């Protein structure tokens, strides 16, 4: 496969002003008629170059130029390109292609999912529909006519407004859609199916009534309310927070079962993975409710950050993704608990994005090259990209940031631009110089901050030294220091916040500051202190960096209960738990566990005056994945064992407190997804999980009762998970069976049922995983099912995946090879755990590497998997 370089970007030689599409949908294939109004790009120096259109898996039926059919000598069909050698300055090109959506298992372009037609065009799926300059800097106005059998496909949708509809005879009908906004073809969408429609309206800030419509299969009609409410909240929030009003008369959401990712922001017609949009109290957990709200918001926010202002090329992907993730996380923080939202985001970032940034696929937020763009929809582009925008927000402050975003939207409305344009708008609006800050887009790798301190009691000066370094990553060495906002506070011995008096300061200094690190080393002196303070570093995780500081356990315990920054309280607790678990890795079985950890957890569990949402998060021990990420040479089974030991130790010591905590959090009114109720459910389910780790009979009874009687999926699944992960083998079998019996008709619930098993070291050993793959509810064509079994096994069931005999690795390699032919995008995603082979102790890493080599040697490897595997082995 070829590598594409940012440095080779050239403006398009031809532009397409309008696109007229006509789809004839049939059961054995689809005929696509396309007419493009093409003209030479005045900004291109390519002159009278041949016209080149992208294509993939198309059967070309005819080509005509200005209404005149071209004969075969007048164009060249190379499969991946249609080339017309000589074209006038301005012309109309008509192309007819034949495609087979019913056989499309890659789920890119036009395909079928449970009987309906749907599309996925980002990044390069439109070329699987018709020949077209498939690049985001070609923006066109689309008119789309969809024709299909009326009884099988009563609903026919595309972008924009429906302008015409009618019957065609022989039981067929058509609808024509017109999208007034020029857009790149990756935002094109088409849906045809037998769907029910849910309607609502939203009145915008300027008083326009927007038609909101959700389209789902009839059996899902009752699972739309939450998404619809989330949509209305998002629309209001974007008006209030960013001054962004919706621009079309209709906004549509469609749910489809077979989808490669979460959802897609097609103009006016968002398409969602069913699991990211459908919810009811009985079938969706709190986590699912929150995820749906966040994804609905994310896709909606793209209407401005992505659609009205789009990307010039795919290297700029984070322009829309990083910014939109930042926007959706602000939204979630505003409608829920800001501290908890920050904790969740940082957990993902530190566990998974840091691992990516330290591994063989590490790349900058704005990559310089790629082979397959689908592989670059990564945690770095999305989450680190969002952190970069968050840092701009921190450096500029909310008001200047808003001025910057206003300027960005106004200046670039209707354009395809770069991350640099975004930063420039922020600079121009605020007057700040972000030239060094731009390195965050160019340099890969997680910066490390080595922090040391000393207290000069004679002068009352606390001296903080911060040294910055950025590790080498593939293809990048000798990096320059970056511009890092570093928020901190200092605490006195009674837990009080001390004034941060930098030398030059007057008397009333603030108790929190954002220091700006720009050089390799900085020394900060804080004056007027009577005692050595306890530093609270990197509050709110103000930058995506690793902080190294020689914390003592006393300091961690102190911050855990005194830091006014909720995020840092949680972080101190995590650090303490990490420290305790790490000290037990490979230690003798009878080595003691620090009693202060137990005392700290007891305090958290029993003091109900604490913020319960924060407590619910503080009780979660650091995940095995995070502990692996922190390790130099990870011994996964030993890490898993040490973590389990600590958990059991805590559960035994706190047994009575856990039962009391469970009972205290039992009562609540009608089910609602509020931070308070989420915290209660989380606390009681954590208590259950812990009690079942120590075979507690009372816990077992509580779990069984909760499993049968709960009125919501959070509690039912919590009880199921606790029982499945216990030693009560008969209970495990029984509840799994009962659960399946009850919910077998609901794919979203069956997915959860699969992943509870696949992620469990009790229910998810290899023979059981193989049995799940044979289960009648499993479907190799459905990405959600694959993720819930194979993905959950390799990503969450670390004990089983990292078995010393390498069987877990080989299993994964087999599944990747199997999927590579049918769905390369999903196959390439599944490889991820193996790409981390260098992180593990030699016995494991050798076996992981040879599993990768087996994948590499498969014949006819897709470009997607090729890139990941070859870069990982390099
Ligand atoms: N923009 C899409 C992701 C498309 C992925 C293509 N492989 C969803 C989103 O980020 O909103
Ligand atoms: Zn997005």
Image (cartoon, rainbow, N blue to C red):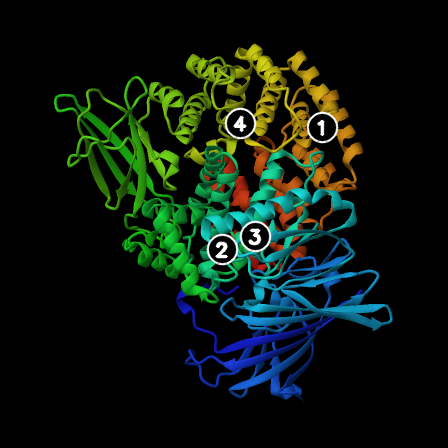
CB-based contact (under 8 Å), mark 4 and mark 2: no
Residue mark closest to the camera, 1 vs 2: 2
Mark 4 → mark 1, Cα distance in angstroms = 33 Å
Which label is found at residue 244? 2
Mark 4 → mark 2, Cα distance in angstroms = 47 Å
Answer with left or right where residue 467 lies relative to residue 461: right
The residue positioned 26% from the left and 43% from the top of the image is 517
Determine whether the residue tagged by mark 2 lies in a helix, strand or loop: loop
Residue mark closest to the camera, 4 vs 3: 3
The residue sitting at the front extreme is 207
Which label is found at residue 711? 1
Mark 1 → mark 2, Cα distance in angstroms = 39 Å
List x then y, in percent, for residue 664.
59, 16
**Toward which corner of the image does residue 681 lie, by quadrant?**
top right
Residue mark closest to the camera, 4 vs 2: 2
**Ligand 1 is in which quadrant of the figure?**
bottom right
CB-based contact (under 8 Å), mark 4 and mark 3: no
Q: Residues within 10 Å of mark 2 (few under 14, many from 20)?
A: many
Pick the residue in front: 211 or 864.
Answer: 211
Mark 2 vs 3, N-terminal side? 2
Determine whether the residue tagged by mark 1 lies in a helix, strand or loop: loop
Mark 4 vs 1, N-terminal side? 4
Residue beneath label 3, please? 299
Mark 4 vs 2, N-terminal side? 2
Tell me if the residue at label 3 has its CB under 8 Å from ligand 1.
yes
List x then y, in percent, for residue 660.
58, 13
Residue beneath label 4, please? 640
Mark 1 → mark 3, Cα distance in angstroms = 30 Å
CB-based contact (under 8 Å), mark 1 and mark 3: no
The residue positioned 43% from the left and 21% from the top of the image is 580
């Amino acid at each position: 496969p070829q590598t594409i370089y940012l440095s080779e970007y050239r403006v398009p030689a031809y532009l397409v002003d309008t696109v007229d599409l006509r789809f004839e949908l049939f059961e054995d294939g689809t005929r696509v008629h396309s007419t493009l109004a093409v003209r030479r790009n005045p900004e291109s120096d390519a002159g009278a170059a041949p016209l080149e259109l992208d294509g993939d898996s198309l059967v070309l039926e005819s080509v005509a130029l200005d209404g005149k059919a071209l004969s075969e000598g007048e164009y060249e069909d190379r499969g991946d390109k249609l080339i017309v050698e000589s074209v006038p300055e301005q012309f109309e090109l008509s192309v007819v292609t034949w495609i087979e959506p019913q056989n499309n298992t890659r789920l890119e372009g036009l395909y079928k999912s449970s009987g309906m037609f749907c599309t996925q065009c980002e990044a390069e799926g439109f070329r699987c529909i018709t020949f077209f300059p498939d690049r985001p800097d070609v923006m066109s106005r689309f008119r789309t006519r969809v024709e299909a059998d009326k009884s099988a496909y009563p609903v026919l949708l595309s972008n924009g407004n429906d302008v015409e509809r009618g019957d065609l005879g022989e039981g067929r009908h058509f609808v024509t859609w017109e999208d007034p906004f020029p857009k790149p073809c990756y935002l094109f969408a088409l849906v045809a199916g037998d769907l029910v429609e849910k309607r609502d309206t939203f009145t915008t800030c300027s008083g326009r009534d927007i038609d909101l419509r959700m389209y789902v299969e009839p059996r899902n009609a009752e699972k739309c309310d939450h998404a619809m409410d989330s949509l209305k909240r998002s629309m209001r929030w974007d008006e209030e927070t960013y001054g962004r009003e919706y621009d079309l008369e209709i906004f549509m959401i469609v749910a489809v079962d077979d989808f490669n990712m979460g959802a897609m922001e097609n103009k006016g017609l968002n398409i969602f993975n069913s699991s990211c949009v459908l919810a009811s109290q009985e079938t969706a957990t709190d986590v699912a409710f929150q995820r749906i709200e966040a994804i609905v918001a994310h896709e909606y926010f793209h209407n401005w950050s992505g659609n009205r202002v789009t990307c010039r090329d795919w290297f700029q992907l984070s322009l829309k993704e990083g910014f939109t993730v930042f926007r959706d996380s602000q939204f979630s923080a505003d409608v829920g608990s800001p501290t908890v939202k920050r904790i969740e985001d940082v957990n993902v970032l530190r566990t998974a994005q840091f691992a990516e940034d330290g591994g063989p696929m590490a790349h900058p937020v704005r990559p310089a090259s790629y082979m397959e763009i689908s592989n670059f929809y990564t945690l770095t582009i999305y989450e680190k990209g969002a952190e970069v925008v968050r840092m701009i927000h921190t450096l500029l402050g909310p008001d200047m940031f808003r001025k910057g975003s206003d300027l960005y939207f106004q200046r670039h409305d209707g354009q395809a631009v770069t991350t640099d344009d975004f930063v420039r708008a922020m600079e121009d609006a605020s007057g700040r110089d972000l030239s060094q800050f731009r390195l965050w887009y160019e340099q890969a790798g997680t910066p490390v901050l080595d922090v040391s301190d000393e207290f000069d009691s004679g002068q009352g000066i606390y001296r903080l030294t911060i040294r910055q370094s950025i590790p080498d990553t593939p293809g990048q060495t000798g990096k320059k220091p970056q511009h890092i906002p570093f928020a901190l506070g200092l605490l006195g011995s009674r837990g009080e916040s001390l004034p941060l008096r930098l030398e030059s300061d007057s008397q009333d200094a603030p108790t929190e500051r954002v220091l700006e690190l720009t050089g390799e080393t900085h020394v900060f002196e804080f004056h007027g202190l009577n005692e050595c303070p306890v530093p609270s570093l990197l509050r709110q995780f103000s930058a995506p960096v690793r902080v190294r500081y020689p914390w003592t356990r006393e300091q961690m315990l102190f911050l855990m209960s005194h830091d006014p920054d909720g995020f840092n309280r949680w972080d101190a607790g995590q650090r303490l738990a990490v420290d305790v678990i790490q000290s037990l890795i490979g230690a003798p079985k009878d080595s003691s566990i620090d009693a202060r950890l137990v005392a700290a957890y007891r305090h958290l569990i029993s003091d109900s005056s604490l913020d319960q949402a924060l407590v619910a998060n503080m009780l979660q021990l650091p995940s095995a994945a995070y502990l692996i990420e922190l390790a130099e040479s990870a011994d996964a089974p030993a890490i898993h064992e040490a973590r389990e030991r600590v958990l059991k130790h805590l559960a035994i010591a706190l047994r009575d407190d856990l039962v009391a905590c469970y009972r205290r959090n039992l009562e609540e009114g009608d089910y609602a997804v509020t931070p308070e109720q989420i915290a209660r459910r989380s606390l009681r389910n954590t208590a259950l999980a812990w009690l079942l780790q120590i075979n507690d009979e009372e816990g077992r009874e509580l779990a069984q009762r909760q499993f049968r009687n709960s009125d919501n999926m959070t509690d039912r699944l919590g009880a199921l998970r606790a029982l499945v992960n216990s030693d009560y083998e008969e209970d495990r079998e029984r509840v799994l069976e009962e659960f399946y019996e009850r919910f077998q008709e609901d794919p979203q619930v069956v997915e959860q049922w699969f992943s509870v098993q696949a992620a469990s070291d009790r229910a998810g050993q290899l023979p059981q995983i193989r049995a799940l793959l044979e289960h009648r509810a499993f479907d190799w064509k459905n990405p959600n099912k694959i993720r819930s079994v194979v993905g959950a096994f390799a990503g969450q069931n670390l004990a089983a995946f990292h078995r010393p005999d390498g069987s877990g690795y080989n299993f994964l390699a087999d599944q990747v090879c199997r999927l590579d032919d049918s769905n390369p995008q999903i196959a390439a995603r599944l490889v991820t755990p193996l790409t981390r082979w260098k992180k593990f102790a030699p016995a494991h890493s050798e076996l992981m590497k040879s599993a990768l080599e087996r994948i590499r040697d498969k014949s006819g490897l897709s470009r997607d998997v090729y890139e990941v595997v070859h870069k990982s082995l390099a």
